[in-house]
Image (cartoon, grey):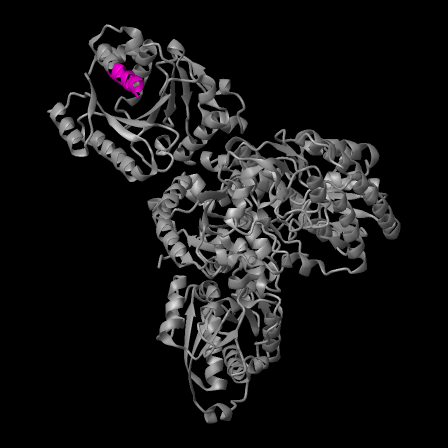
């Protein structure tokens, strides 16, 4: 039954689609969902709003993965489900039930809830139910901020796919503030920068007293402080709509300075930031330090083969380039999306590593991929680890945000750890609570 | 910008009335846009001299996405911007949802910012009031609703449904009911029946349009009566409604 | 309390997961007509066998415009391409919430697909609002209807096990244990549909002499085979020594295998335990546990409650079909059971430490949270199941 899995040699990568997001998979194919697929999911991202609860309104099935992940990872206590039944679709009565359910949740939850998100799904999108109006009504009734969000994969190909709009929703809880202070917000990532990153020290030396991130705000009040920041730094593309909305609503300008692992790319990113922030950033010593450490790790690890996947917290193309620059071999990339900002790295790879095969996780022929018995020494991302079974896997999860020169060093350290202490891929992956 | 949704039972003369109003207001020197929200997609036919505007849903069906307003809008009589939402293949899909998709596209393409109309008319089929057909009365779309009705039972029934929908959404800052336009079909005791109905639902009758064969005469030439002959009694009646709408806008 | 509001429990496995679970091992091209998220539920949360497998359960990647326009051409096109690439034996197409909104007719899609591809096509009108057991039931019935062939020859002492999915029975070792037990009892051939069998074996299903139904959702399929091919069925899972002995005796007598009547002395002497027990779970499993508790533990007062469909013929007076979460809260508050058995997630409803809670994981409830837990219960092992 086995069929040759679909791939593109990197030299032929130039897939079709919208200008800002292109797919590797040709159009009109069924979609495979490997066990390694997924990320944080809409619910977990939505619950980044501190002291908030979410009411998820949907047919029973839609919320299952989010709820199980919530039980696994501990956020289920703030998550409630209102199940839609068939009759509700015709009568629309589930929309009335939202008010009763919200009342029950808001009066019973201890400690008292300070904010609420109501999440709608594909079905209400199609019915044209107005969750935004419901949120406004609840907000005025209970005097707490209430927002609507949408877990609607049916809108995935449009201009406002759920992975983008959910980020817009969480930052929409920040009220506008006319007073600004020299501080930066990090937008787009789900975790604040790892402790070891030089970023805070660099910013502090440049006069920015705070580096703020939603996941580092223990209270809703802390979150409102993000509205006082003078600049937004967008580090992952998924936050773009949010950053644009914050610019309009809160008057905070933003700059895209994506997470990168190549030392030269990181240096370039810092210079983009200098221009945006209109300050000089003193990063040279961190650059030198990182360069040495990276060299040490590379010697330690040796010129191994590494497969790169798209579930990793990275641009797979930038990451592949960085690894090749550090002396590794990258025979395979598993990725289905390419973005404009990756163009430069793809061009580089076409020139310097034309033998790379780019597989998409989602092509139907990938169901038989394991029969190919593809092997590498190391895999970065659960998807690469799954498809290259037996490889020592560095998950590089979204739960920890590596950034800057220290981020590149941390990556190599994690690669070394994966070689020294190999983990069971299945156990490690299922424990991470990833959802589609 | 003032946005008005005109609802009414299918076949009651909504499109005729809406197009005539659009033409009348444009004659008063205002920029007007008319958006047909009926799967039949023939709301604006009398404003375009018979030129067919490509309905948004047809366009999306063929090309998947749309990046230019010119593909889905044309300028007709007095530069009135004409758009048709269109609908799915009959018997399939969801027409109400089609209206939502059409509105989302107009928003994405910044239609109002680009055309800067003073008045926008949504011409909406009012037999069905599901989520999609209620879209034009949502916050951010129409400010006011005008219902076109005759004295016929089914027409009043539809009008009542529309009124109920508006009332249901009263708390949501949706559009409010501006009033009724009586479009006469010359059924027995029509004036009294409609006046009674208006009183019962607490609505004002803002126009009483007589039945007039000239409507059909000019429709054959793909024109409104306003374009055809502004001096006719019916044209003057419509101009009066137009004046009222314009004056209110100016006053506010 | 608002009906349909779930504050503690996760949503249970939905109907489409049930269908996919039944079809998982049978070598078909299973297409979920959804935007991708529903398929993700199945593959990552409701199918413990997904990891490392090459079963083709794929999403149609449905998009808004297709729904609004009622445009089925894309899904046809995608399926035809996949059929060419993957060479599977049959196609199944099943629904999700979004296409339900416009009343998608899966039967009609199946008819056209069968013409275009020359493959058997199964259609399932699932919508994600019902629970897995309805999907499982639909799928077993469809397998019986669509694939079993009228028998030209009858086998001797051949048995089908119907109703087994990991959603109810977890790890496949349980059904392997049951198969072994049946073979040791004198059965010549045992085929456990959907867990350890091929489609070819199911095609021969009508040649069997007996069906063992191990979940409520297996009943419809077994009833179909009884009505069409006169195959009797036996409902239940043998748990514990005593129950296993009766079960084996039953199977032997239905298959005409000679056996000695053993007199059950032990149960006659068993002291009555007056404690009350509530079992929350799948009905057949619940009933089988109840029999075991009565037989081996002397517990007489045992109530079975289930959030999933319960068959009238298997109900005992006092059994409780649960519709909403608050019903379970009230049941536990008001009735003061001494012992509660069920998925670990039900423990949050148990207010005091005075109530003895015994874990019996149910994948359709707690998904991957407990699916790797080993709990032996089939046959003699069952005797050591609970410390009571």
Q: Position of residue B24 (x, y in %)?
A: 30, 12
Looking at the image, which is closer to me, A322 or A87? A322
The residue drawn where x is 31% and y is 8% is B227
Can the viewer see residue C204? no
Residue stretch rendered in magenta on the structure: B241-252
Can the viewer see residue C348? yes
In the depicted structure, whether residue A428 falls above or below residue C377: above
In magenta stretch: residue B249: yes
In the picture, which quadrant includes the N terminus of chain C? Answer: bottom left
Q: Position of residue C84 (x, y in %)?
A: 64, 42
In magenta stretch: residue B228: no
Q: Is residue A27 left or right of residue A307?
A: left
Q: Position of residue C216 (x, y in %)?
A: 46, 67
- Determine the image quadrant of residue B252: top left
Q: Main secondary structure of the magenta part?
A: helix
Looking at the image, which is closer to me, B51 or C150? B51
The residue drawn where x is 38% and y is 9% is B78
In the depicted structure, whether residue A286 falls above or below residue B240: below
């Amino acid at each position: 039954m086995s069929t040759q899995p679909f791939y593109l040699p990197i030299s032929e990568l130039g897939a079709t689609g919208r200008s800002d997001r292109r797919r590797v998979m040709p159009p009109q194919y069924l979609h495979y969902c490997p066990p390694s697929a997924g990320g944080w999911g809409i619910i977990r991202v939505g619950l980044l709003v501190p002291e908030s609860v979410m009411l998820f309104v949907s047919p029973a099935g839609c919320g299952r993965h989010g709820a199980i992940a919530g039980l696994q990872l501990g956020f289920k206590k703030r998550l409630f489900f209102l199940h839609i039944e068939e009759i509700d679709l015709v009568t629309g009565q589930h929309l009335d039930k939202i008010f009763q359910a919200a009342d029950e949740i808001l009066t019973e939850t201890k400690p008292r809830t300070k904010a609420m998100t109501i999440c709608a799904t594909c079905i209400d999108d199609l019915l044209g139910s107005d969750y935004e109006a419901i949120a406004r009504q609840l907000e005025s009734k209970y005097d707490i901020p209430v927002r609507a969000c949408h877990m609607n994969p049916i809108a995935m190909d449009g201009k406002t796919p759920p992975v983008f709009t959910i980020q817009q929703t969480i930052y929409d809880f920040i009220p506008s503030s006319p007073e600004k202070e020299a501080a930066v917000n990090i937008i787009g990532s789900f975790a604040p920068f790892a402790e070891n990153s030089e970023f805070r020290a660099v910013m502090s030396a440049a006069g920015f007293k705070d580096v703020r991130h939603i996941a580092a705000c223990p209270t809703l009040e802390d979150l409102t402080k993000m509205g006082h920041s003078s600049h937004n730094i967008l580090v992952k593309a998924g936050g773009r709509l949010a950053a644009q909305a914050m610019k309009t609503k809160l008057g905070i300008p933003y700059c895209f300075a994506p997470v990168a692992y190549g030392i030269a790319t990181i240096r370039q990113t810092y210079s983009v930031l200098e221009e945006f922030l209109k300050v000089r950033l003193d990063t040279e010593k961190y650059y030198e330090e990182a360069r040495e450490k990276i060299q040490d790790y590379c010697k330690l690890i040796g010129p191994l083969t590494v497969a790169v996947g798209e579930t990793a917290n990275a641009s797979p193309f930038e990451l592949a380039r960085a690894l090749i620059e550090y002396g590794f071999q990258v025979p395979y990339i598993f990725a289905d999306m390419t973005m404009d900002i990756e163009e430069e790295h793809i061009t580089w790879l076409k020139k310097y590593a034309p033998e790379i095969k780019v597989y998409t996780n989602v092509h139907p022929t990938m169901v038989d991929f394991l029969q190919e018995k593809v092997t590498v020494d190391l895999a970065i991302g659960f998807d690469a680890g799954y498809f290259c079974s037996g490889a020592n896997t560095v998950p590089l999860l979204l739960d920890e945000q590596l950034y800057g020169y220290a981020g590149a060093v941390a990556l190599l350290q994690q690669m070394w750890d994966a070689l020294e202490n190999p983990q069971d891929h299945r156990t490690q992956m299922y424990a991470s609570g990833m959802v589609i | 910008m003032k946005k008005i949704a005109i609802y009414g039972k299918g076949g009651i003369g909504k499109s005729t009335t809406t197009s005539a109003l659009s033409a009348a207001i444009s004659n008063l020197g205002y920029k007007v846009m008319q958006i047909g929200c009926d799967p039949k997609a023939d709301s604006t036919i009398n404003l375009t001299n018979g030129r067919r505007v490509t309905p948004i849903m047809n366009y999306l069906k063929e090309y998947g996405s749309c990046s230019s307003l010119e593909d889905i809008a044309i300028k007709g009589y007095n530069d009135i911007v004409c758009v048709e939402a269109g609908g799915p293949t009959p018997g399939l899909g969801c027409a109400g949802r089609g209206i939502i998709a059409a509105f989302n596209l107009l928003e994405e393409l910044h239609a109002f910012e680009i055309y800067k109309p003073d008045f926008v008319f949504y011409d909406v089929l009012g037999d069905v009031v599901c989520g999609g057909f209620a879209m034009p009365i949502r916050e951010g779309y129409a400010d006011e609703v005008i219902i076109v009705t005759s004295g016929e039972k089914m027409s009043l029934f539809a009008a009542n449904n529309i009124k109920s929908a508006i009332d249901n959404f009263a708390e949501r800052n949706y559009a409010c009911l501006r009033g009724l336009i009586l479009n006469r079909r010359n059924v027995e005791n029509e004036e009294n029946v409609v006046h009674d109905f208006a009183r019962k639902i607490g609505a004002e009758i803002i126009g009483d349009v007589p039945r007039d064969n000239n409507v059909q005469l000019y429709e054959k030439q793909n024109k409104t009566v306003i374009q055809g002959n502004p001096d006719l009694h019916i044209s003057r009646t419509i101009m009066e409604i137009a004046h009222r709408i314009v004056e209110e806008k100016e006053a506010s | 309390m608002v009906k349909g509001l779930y504050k503690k429990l996760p949503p249970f496995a939905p109907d489409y997961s049930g269908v996919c679970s039944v079809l998982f091992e049978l070598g078909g091209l299973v297409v979920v007509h959804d935007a991708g998220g529903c398929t993700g539920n199945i593959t990552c949360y409701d199918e413990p066998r997904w990891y490392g497998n090459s079963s083709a359960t794929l999403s149609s990647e449905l998009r808004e415009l297709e729904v609004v326009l009622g445009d089925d051409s894309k899904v046809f096109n995608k399926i035809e391409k996949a059929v060419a690439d993957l060479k599977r034996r049959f196609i199944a197409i099943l629904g999700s919430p979004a296409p339900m909104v416009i009343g998608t007719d899966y039967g009609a899609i199946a008819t056209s697909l069968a013409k275009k591809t020359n493959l058997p096509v199964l259609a399932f009108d699932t919508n994600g609002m019902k629970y897995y057991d309805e999907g499982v039931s639909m799928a077993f019935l469809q397998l019986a209807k669509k694939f079993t062939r009228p028998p030209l020859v009858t086998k001797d002492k051949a048995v089908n096990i119907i109703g087994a999915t990991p959603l109810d029975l977890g790890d496949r070792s349980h059904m392997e244990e049951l198969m072994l037990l049946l073979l040791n009892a004198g059965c010549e051939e045992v085929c456990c549909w959907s867990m350890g069998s091929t489609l070819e074996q199911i095609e021969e299903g009508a040649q069997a002499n007996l069906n063992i139904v191990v979940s409520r959702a297996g009943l419809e399929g077994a009833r179909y085979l009884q009505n069409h091919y006169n195959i009797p069925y036996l409902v239940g899972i043998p748990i514990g020594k005593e129950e296993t002995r009766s079960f084996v005796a039953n199977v032997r007598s239905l298959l005409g295998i000679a056996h000695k009547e053993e007199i059950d002395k032990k149960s006659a002497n068993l002291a009555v335990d007056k404690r009350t027990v509530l079992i929350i779970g799948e009905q057949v499993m619940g009933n089988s546990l109840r029999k075991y508790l009565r037989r081996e533990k002397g517990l007489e007062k045992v109530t079975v409650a289930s959030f999933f469909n319960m068959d009238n013929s298997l109900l005992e007076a006092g059994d409780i079909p649960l519709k909403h979460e608050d019903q379970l809260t009230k049941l536990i508050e008001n009735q003061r059971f001494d012992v509660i058995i069920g998925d670990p997630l039900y423990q949050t409803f148990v207010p005091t430490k005075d109530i003895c809670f015994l874990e019996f994981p149910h994948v359709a409830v707690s998904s991957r949270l407990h699916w790797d837990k080993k709990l032996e219960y089939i046959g003699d092992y069952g005797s050591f199941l609970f410390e009571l």
